[in-house]
Amino acid sequence: MALTFLPFIVIIAMILFSAVKILNEYERGVVFRLGKFTDVRGPGLILLIPGLEKMAKIDLRLITMDVPSQDIISKDNVTLKVNGVVYFKVSNPERAIISVENYYHATAQIAQTTLRSVIGQYELDEILAQRDRINARLQEILDELTEPWGVKITNVEVKAIDLPSEMQRAMAKQAEAEREKRAKIISAQGEFEAAQKLSEAAKVLSSEKDAITLRFLETMREMSGNGNSTTFLPIPVDFLNKFIK
């Protein structure tokens, strides 16, 4: 008699087992009863009515999604390859299940098209120099587009910008020319300051009668202290001035 009811007992046990679900702390269950949304349950032990209720499980943890390289033409007609990364999470499990078929795939596609659209509005120099501004703009647009899906964009980063080889060579030449320009400016500034100091020194020497004599004696002392065999004959400055006049 017991063997007769054994299959029924096994079937009932399987049905009851399928009605019991356990969700982790970072998971939520979107429950449908006869195809109609009822509520969001979890975490912990979840009981479903067998045959009447079904549950779709949603992960609430932060998701890191790579955006593959996109061929983009900048505002100044430079062809680039740009890739990025998007950080997002589900903020509304109900919308993530009901409003869109696959929220992950939808977010990936909208991220690729938005990346091409936004970066195409900037010139090359702006893309290279204003990456933080572009990242903020991308996050703002993506967050607005994915909000109806129950998805929250927390951060967007442009990872790499690949330039054509001829553009890389042109930029290298430009950078080298800029460095040479700065070096020449610094050298000219130094010569200008040295000339100013020499002019000030000449004014001091010309205004003081004994200053040029002291400088002459200092020069002779430096020459005699080098340990060389140079012979020099000191001539008074006033004596030379007579010949000059």
Image: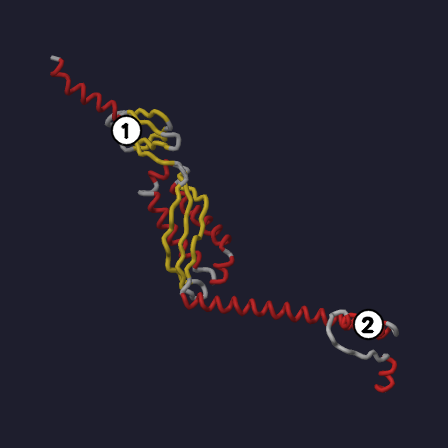
The residue carrying pointer 2 sits among few (fewer than 14), some (14 to 19) or many (20 or more) residues within 10 Å by Cα, namely few
Q: Is residue 113 left or right of residue 174?
A: left
Q: Is 179 situated above or below 43?
A: below
Residue that appears at 38% across and 51% down: 67
The residue carrying pointer 1 sits among few (fewer than 14), some (14 to 19) or many (20 or more) residues within 10 Å by Cα, namely some
Q: Is residue 114 left or right of residue 211?
A: left
Instruction: Specify the quadrant that holds the N terminus.
Output: top left
Residue 196, horizontal then vertical, whole percent: 74, 71
Q: Is 139 situated above or below 5?
A: below
**First-in-chain label (2 vs 1):** 1
Residue that appears at 36% across and 36% down: 59
Front residue of this view, candidates 13 and 39? 13
The residue wearing badge 1 is 53
Q: Are marks 2 and 1 in contact (CB under 8 Å)?
A: no
Q: Is 76 situated above or below 69?
A: below
Q: Secondary structure at mark 1?
A: strand
Front residue of this view, candidates 173 and 199? 199
**Amino acid tagged 2:** Arg
